[in-house]
Image (cartoon, rainbow, N blue to C red):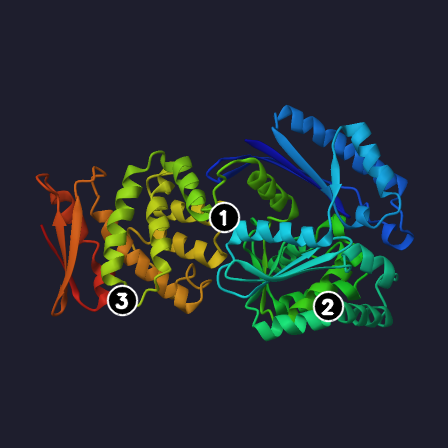
């Protein structure tokens, strides 16, 4: 079913159109955004300004045309803080319905937080933790503390960037007195909440809004990183703190020259940066991670769940299978390698000290290890790494995606080294996992060298100083597989500290 979701926010109106299957797979067809600033002066006056309403209605007229052209089956549109708090909200909603045909529902802050949580869980999985979700809108900030994919609490607080900028940061650049008043106000509103988050032991903050994505883009630009896709990118708390200092001490002209800044957010960034800096410092979160899925995507997922009978939730597997199908078709070889790799994992994981959670990542890496052939045969393992890293694999955190990609890259030619530049982005424990999975994948891939599934089964056993892989090919010749495998056991042998031998 083709679904559409529209978010009439305090800064911008957003729309997403996507095909959603019964199995839960989401394929985005179209995205569009228009900056309208409904929150401009609305939080001070209590009324939406005529020029902002005109811009919003004009954007929604065009959105509705796109919905018709895209043949969308069902759409849901919601409005948030600026509209929710305005005295003239009823007349604005009636005007939208009259001029565009869209029925816009005003949602509460609690519902806003719930939808943001749905989107972030779909996009990043949110296992382990606790993780602190933060979405800085124009009028409100949504905060959700999540552990193992479940929210511990959800809060919506009137601390949006536009609201704070208009009320507290009236000078350009803001004075010290204004900044102190702003910090006192933020502390009064969420200081106690951040103490609870710190006590819970927050491992990272995850930002789901445009202002936070801008902060992370600026941090990457300051490091000299290429400004590639932001989803999963991160900035340390120290980097955010420095950026906040730069943003509040510069006037708008100087801010516009800061690398990575979004020109449409120049007036909002000092307030947004001060707020995010406060959250990171008081919660103790060491790092801020970008999540490009937010309210509109959560709205789409909620609509899919309510509309499509039997809507699935196995987001990770669906995401991997969709990527494999896109570049490898039926992927018979990938599935055979995954089968053999899992057999090897079960036999070697205790000796390699691989956690049980790594088994799933190995399967996905096996399914995706050859997708780089779609670009070029030579160095296809490197192309596979690039495709996995830059695809929208939902339900995984960035570290898991990196492990999957590193294992796929190491399945042929030179094995990945722990001190290689590509591995340095991973924590030491994850580097060891990636290397262990690559060692297993090298052997499993070799055991299907012909791509004809000649090897029907394997049995693994240990003897003093050796690991023996028994290869069952029924009545078929497996000479090519055995010959290739003998040349690919080097890394596994080193990691196991024993010779790996084959028996037909």
Give left or right: position of 389 versus 235. left
- Residue 102 location (% of width, % of height): 74, 32
Say whether disc 2 or disc 1 marks the residue closer to the N-terminus.
2
| Vertical arrangement, residue 276 with respect to residue 390, above or below | below
Look at the image and tell me whether residue 371 can be seen. yes
The residue located at (62%, 70%) in the rendering is 197
| Vertical arrangement, residue 363 with respect to residue 73, above or below | below
Task: Give the Cα separation between the discs numbered 2 and 1.
Answer: 30 Å
The quadrant where residue 478 appears = top left
Secondary-structure class at tag 1:
loop
Q: Which residue is mark 2?
A: 190
Q: Quick one: label 3, few (<14), some, or many (20+) residues within 10 Å?
A: few
- Residue 295 location (% of width, % of height): 65, 48
Residue 394: image tag:
1
Q: Which residue is mark 3?
A: 350
| Vertical arrangement, residue 11 with respect to residue 152, above or below | above
Secondary-structure class at tag 3:
helix
Give left or right: position of 227 versus 255. left
Say whether disc 1 or disc 3 marks the residue closer to the N-terminus.
3
Closer to the camera, 92 or 429?
Answer: 92
Q: Quick one: label 1, few (<14), some, or many (20+) residues within 10 Å?
A: many
Residue 237: image tag:
none
The residue located at (33%, 56%) in the rendering is 359
The quarter of the picture where the N terminus appears is top right
Say whether disc 2 or disc 3 marks the residue closer to the N-terminus.
2
Look at the image and tell me whether residue 267 can be seen. no
Task: Give the Cα separation between the discs numbered 2 and 3.
Answer: 45 Å
- Residue 307 location (% of width, % of height): 57, 36
Q: Is there CB contact under 8 Å for labels 2 and 1?
A: no
Secondary-structure class at tag 2:
helix
């Amino acid at each position: 079913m083709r679904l559409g979701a529209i978010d009439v926010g305090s800064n911008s109106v957003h729309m997403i159109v996507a095909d959603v299957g019964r199995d839960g797979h989401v394929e985005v067809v179209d995205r569009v955004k228009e900056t309208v600033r409904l929150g401009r002066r609305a939080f001070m006056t209590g009324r939406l300004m005529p020029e902002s309403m005109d811009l919003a209605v004009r954007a929604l007229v065009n959105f509705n045309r796109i919905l018709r052209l895209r043949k969308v089956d069902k759409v849901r549109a919601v409005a948030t803080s600026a509209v929710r708090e305005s005295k003239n909200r009823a007349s604005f909603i009636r005007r939208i319905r009259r001029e565009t045909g869209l029925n816009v529902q005003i949602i509460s802050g609690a519902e806003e937080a719930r939808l943001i949580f749905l989107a972030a869980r779909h996009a990043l999985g949110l296992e382990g933790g606790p993780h602190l979700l933060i979405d800085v809108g124009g009028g409100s900030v949504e905060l959700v503390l999540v552990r193992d994919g479940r929210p511990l609490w959800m809060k919506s607080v009137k601390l949006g960037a536009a609201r704070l900028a208009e009320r507290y940061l009236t000078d350009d650049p803001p004075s010290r007195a204004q900044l102190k008043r702003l910090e006192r106000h933020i502390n009064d509103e969420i200081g106690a909440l951040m103490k609870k988050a710190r006590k819970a032991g927050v491992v990272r903050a995850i930002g789901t809004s445009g202002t936070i994505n801008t902060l992370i883009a600026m941090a990457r630009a300051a490091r000299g990183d290429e400004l590639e896709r932001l989803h999963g990118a991160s900035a340390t708390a120290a980097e955010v703190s420095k950026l906040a200092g730069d943003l509040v001490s510069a006037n708008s002209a100087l801010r516009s020259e800061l690398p990575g800044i979004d020109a449409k957010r120049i007036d909002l960034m000092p307030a947004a940066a001060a707020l995010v800096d406060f959250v990171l410092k008081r919660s103790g979160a060491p790092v801020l991670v970008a999540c490009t899925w937010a309210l509109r995507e959560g709205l789409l997922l909620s609509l899919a769940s309510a509309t499509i009978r039997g809507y699935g939730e196995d987001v990770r597997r669906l995401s991997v299978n969709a990527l494999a199908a896109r570049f490898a078709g039926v992927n018979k070889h990938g599935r055979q390698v995954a089968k053999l790799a899992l057999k090897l994992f079960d036999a070697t994981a205790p000796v390699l000290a691989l956690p049980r959670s790594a088994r799933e990542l190995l399967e996905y890496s096996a399914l995706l290890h050859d997708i780089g052939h779609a670009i070029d045969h030579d160095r296809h393992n490197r192309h596979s790494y690039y495709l996995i890293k830059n695809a929208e694999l939902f339900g995984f955190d960035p570290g898991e995606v990196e492990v999957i990609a590193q294992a796929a890259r190491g399945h042929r030619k030179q094995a990945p080294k722990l001190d290689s530049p590509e591995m340095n982005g991973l924590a030491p424990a994850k580097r060891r996992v990636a290397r262990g999975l690559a060692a297993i994948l090298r052997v499993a891939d070799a055991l299907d060298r012909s791509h004809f599934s000649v090897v029907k089964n394997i049995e693994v056993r240990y003897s003093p100083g050796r690991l023996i892989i028994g290869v069952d090919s029924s009545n078929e010749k497996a000479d090519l597989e055995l010959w290739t495998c003998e040349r690919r056991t080097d890394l596994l042998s080193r990691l196991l500290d024993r010779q790996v031998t084959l028996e037909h």
